[in-house]
Image (cartoon, grey):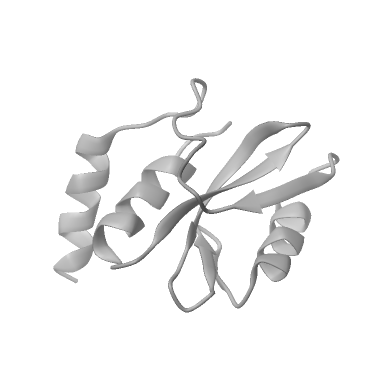
């Protein structure tokens, strides 16, 4: 992990009502965290995708991922992954900044 995806996902969950944390799995492990929006859209640092298929394709291309992406889940159940940087303090601080933009 290069870090930041879970921090951003938790930040967006704080400021977007109904948003849920989602995961992209590769080789049976969490490879990336994203946000499932109530309107059926998906978001990460690369922007908003209209559906999960578009987000998966974009992620595969942008990350030059050579592993098959197995699933996209938005049940908040795979958090935390021990190797992913996580800071609720930072997520809350970012949420406060973004709300004030």
Classify the position of the N terminus by image quarter.
top right
Q: Residue furthest top?
A: 82
Left or right of 27: which side holds 97? left
The residue under the point 23% across, 63% down is 98
The residue under the point 20% across, 36% down is 89
What is the tally of numbered marks visible in this picture? Answer: 0
Left or right of 65: which side holds 51? left
The residue under the point 26% across, 56% down is 14
Above or below, comparing residue 51 to residue 61 in the picture: below
Residue 84 image offset from top left, x and y in percent:
49, 28
Residue 64 visible here:
no
Compare residues 61 and 52 and report the one nearer the observer.
52
Residue 90 visible here:
yes
Tell me which corner region of the image, top left, top right, bottom left or bottom right, holds residue 30. top right
Classify the position of the C terminus by image quarter.
bottom left
Residue 91 image offset from top left, x and y in percent:
27, 44
Residue 23 image offset from top left, x and y in percent:
58, 46
Above or below, comparing residue 35 to residue 39 in the picture: above
Compare residues 77 and 41 and report the one nearer the observer.
77
The residue under the point 52% across, 35% down is 78
Residue 40 image offset from top left, x and y in percent:
53, 75
């Amino acid at each position: 992990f290069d870090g930041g995806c879970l921090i951003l996902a938790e930040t967006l969950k704080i400021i977007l009502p109904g948003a849920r944390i989602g995961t992209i799995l590769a080789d049976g492990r969490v490879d990336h965290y994203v946000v499932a929006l109530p309107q059926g859209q998906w978001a990460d640092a690369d922007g908003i995708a209209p559906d999960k298929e578009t987000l998966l394709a974009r992620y595969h291309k942008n990350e030059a991922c050579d592993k098959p992406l197995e699933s996209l889940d938005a049940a908040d159940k795979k958090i935390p992954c021990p190797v992913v940087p996580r800071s609720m303090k930072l997520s809350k601080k970012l949420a406060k900044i973004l709300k004030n933009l």
